[in-house]
Amino acid sequence: MPYIRVELLKGRSPEQKKELAKALTETYARVFETRVDGIHVTFDEREHHDLALGGVPFTERLKNRKKETG
């Protein structure tokens, strides 16, 4: 049973996750020539304050982006 684990920041809609799960499942099945009904997709959502890029927490990145866009 293959598992696909997706880590992402909170804020994506259930519809977006459903679309991504479908695309990942179909692609995995095509590439590895397997059935889709045994492929698991798990979403691990993180709070913005739990992640940083380049030493800058995503909460600060969001504040800076809002300042830049207006």
Image (tube, helix red, strand yellow):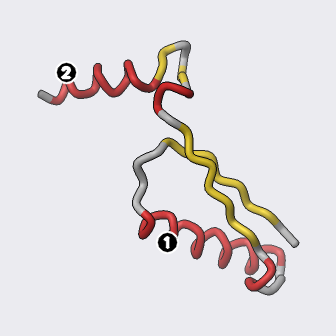
Q: Looking at the rendered structure, which numbered label has been put on residue 57?
A: none
Residue at the far right in the pictured view? 1
Classify residue 3 as left or right of residue 68: right
Q: Residue at point 67% right, 60% down? A: 42
Residue at the far top in the pictured view? 55
Q: Residue at point 54% right, 16% down? A: 54
- The residue singled out by tag 2 in the image is 67
Q: Residue at point 46% right, 31% down? A: 48
Q: Amino acid at mark 2?
A: Lys
Q: Quadrant of residue 65?
A: top left
Residue 69 % position (x, y): 17, 29
Q: Secondary structure at mark 2?
A: helix
Q: Amino acid at mark 1?
A: Glu
Q: Secondary structure at mark 1?
A: helix
- The residue singled out by tag 1 in the image is 19
Residue at the far left in the pictured view? 70
Callouts 2 and 1 close, C-beta under 8 Å: no
The quadrant of the rendering that contains the N terminus is bottom right
Residue density around tag 2, few if under 14, some if 14–19, many if 20 or more, within 10 Å: few
Determine the CA span between mark 2 and mark 1.
Answer: 31 Å
Q: Quadrant of residue 39?
A: bottom right
Residue 25 % position (x, y): 67, 74
Classify residue 22 as left or right of residue 28: left
Mark 2 or mark 1: name the one nearer the start of the chain: 1
Classify residue 60 as left or right of residue 1: left
Residue 60 % position (x, y): 38, 18
